[in-house]
């Protein structure tokens, strides 16, 4: 299985949480969306400065794992994002913007999304664990 980590599961992996650690170890490939990297970095910036260097170091170690790859948006991602945005608006079930980017990447690359966020239930085309 190829995993895409939502921000909350990336946070769990950096702690490390045994449940997500085993998922990451069992996965064929693990992708970290650019949005999650931005949200994690924002958390580091808002957090206790005494822990920043340690948190940054954990992130660097995680991103250097051989099965981990950062995933960025491209033109196809923007098309999927637009369709998904319209679909959810019509249904009256909008999802936060960053969640839409993450869902769009999951759809585009046919990845299973590891998340604890319930709003992804509004996107049935996204496989979740």
Image (cartoon, grey):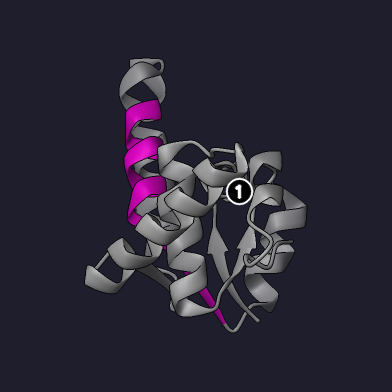
Going by the image, does 83 lie left or right of 6? left
Which residue is label 1 attached to? 9
Residue shown at 73%/65% (left/top)?
A: 22
Stretch of the chain drawn in magenta: 29-43
- Answer with left or right where residue 87 lies relative to residue 9: left
| Element type at mark 1 | helix
* Viewer-proximal residue among 94 and 29: 94
Looking at the rendered structure, the number of numbered marks drawn on it comes to 1
Q: Can residue 72 be seen in this view?
A: no
Quadrant containing the C terminus in the rendered view: bottom right
Left or right of 35 on screen, residue 23: right
Q: In which quarter of the image is the N terminus?
A: bottom right
The residue at the point 35 percent across, 54 percent down is 60
Q: Per the image, is 35 magenta?
A: yes
Magenta stretch: includes residue 121: no
Percent x, y for residue 48? 40, 15
Residue 2 image offset from top left, x and y in percent: 58, 78
* Of 86 and 127, the residue lying toward us: 86
> In the rendered image, is residue 46 in sight?
yes
User: What main secondary structure does the magenta stretch of the protein show?
Assistant: helix
Q: Where is residue 72 in the image (x, y as percent from the top left)?
A: 29, 64
**In x, y percent, where is residue 36?**
41, 47
Query: For the view shown, which residue lies furthest in the front direction?
Result: 90
Name the residue at 33% across, 54% down: 34
């Amino acid at each position: 299985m190829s995993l895409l980590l939502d921000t909350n599961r990336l946070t769990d992996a950096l702690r490390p949480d045994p449940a997500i650690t085993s998922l990451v170890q069992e996965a064929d490939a693990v992708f970290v969306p650019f949005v999650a990297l931005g949200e994690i970095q924002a958390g580091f910036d808002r957090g206790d400065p005494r822990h920043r260097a340690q948190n940054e170091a954990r992130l660097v170690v995680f991103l250097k794992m051989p099965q981990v790859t950062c995933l960025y948006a491209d033109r196809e991602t923007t098309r999927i994002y637009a369709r998904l945005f319209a679909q959810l608006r019509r249904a009256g079930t909008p999802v936060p913007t960053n969640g839409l980017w993450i869902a769009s990447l999951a759809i585009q690359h046919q990845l299973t999304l590891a998340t604890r966020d319930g709003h992804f239930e509004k996107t049935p085309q996204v496989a979740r664990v």
